[in-house]
Image (cartoon, rainbow, N blue to C red):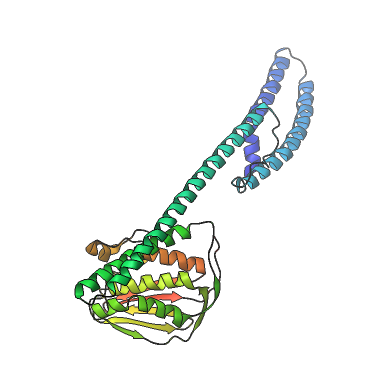
Amino acid sequence: MQMFGDFLSAHKKNIIVWLIVCAVFAVVFSLYELPLAPVLYGAVLSGFFGVVFIATDFVYYRRKRTALQRLADEITLSAENIPLPQNGIEEDYTKLIHTLYDSLKAAENEAAEKLSDMTDYYTMWVHQIKTPIAAMGLILQNGDSPEYSELSENLQKIEQYAEMVLCYLRLDSNSSDLVIKEYDLDSIVKQAVRKFSSQFIRRQLKLVYKPLEKTVLTDEKWLLFVIEQIISNAVKYTLSGGVEIYCEEPLTLCIRDTGIGIAPEDIPRIFEKGYTGCNGRLDKKASGIGLYLCRRICGKLGHKITAESGDSGTVIKLFLERSRLVIE
């Protein structure tokens, strides 16, 4: 009904002109005292042909309107299916649409090329900087003083930030390097724990690790990055006590700490890009990117990540039951 109303609105001028012509003939015949029957017959006859014309035109109008509505969902892919113009004005509009579409695609291609070049450059930069970081790490392993330990910890943070940059770039890349298969969850978690073992010792934090004895269908590299980010945050914000790693059913990896916790008002937003919350503002070193990347990666792998916090600390849960895989 709305489409028919729009059609009548588009032809209201023609309808008004027909009514005016009929009224003029009626007035003229009335002034000359002529019988009004011919006017009535003429009005009925012209009205009949008018209805036939309007019905035919409406069929074409509805077909064209439906095609345009369907095309609205496909215009980002192609502008080739636009209905053929029926007059000069429609032809000009069609040319304008094609011109705008071509300009849009050219701008998108240029932006995609620039993004690809920038991604390639930063990816190469990250790989290059990881070499001296690894060399410095080997040198610092030979020292056993507190200064060496502190330097080693800060170097590990630099390496972690470099990994975050690489992860950030790869997440939005059109190419996917996912290797999805069954992995031993204990093996992945132990890799992450070993990476932060020196920080556990230096901060005198207790690690409670319960063997998981689970396999998970995932990508090892990406899941390892997520677990490392969670353990890093747990160590960073835990002043005393420790970190506990265990598994719940169904296939849920839990990482609990006895740290300062997360403010209740921050819980719904901690996975947002750039959001640091109260703890981040006090620390002044948080980027608000780590947990955001974790959420993005979990979504890509078909996993889910949640956070719970209270006076006794924070627990991050990774639901590893994979229901779908997102290929971007």
Picture residue at 73% right of the left edge, 16% below the top: 29
At which x and y percent is residue 181?
56, 75
Q: Is residue 1 visible?
A: no
Picture residue at 72% right of the left edge, 18% below the top: 25
Which quarter of the rendered picture does the N terminus lie within? top right
Q: Quadrant of residue 105?
A: top right
Of 214 and 140, nearer the camera is 140
At which x and y percent is residue 247?
43, 83
Q: Is residue 227 above or below residue 30?
A: below
Of 55 and 63, nearer the camera is 63
Q: In the drawing, does residue 236 fall left or right of residue 28? A: left
At which x and y percent is residue 88?
67, 26
Of 89 and 303, nearer the camera is 303
Residue sitting farthest toward the left: 146
At which x and y percent is residue 99?
59, 34
Picture residue at 31% right of the left edge, 67% below the top: 136
Q: Quadrant of residue 196?
A: bottom left
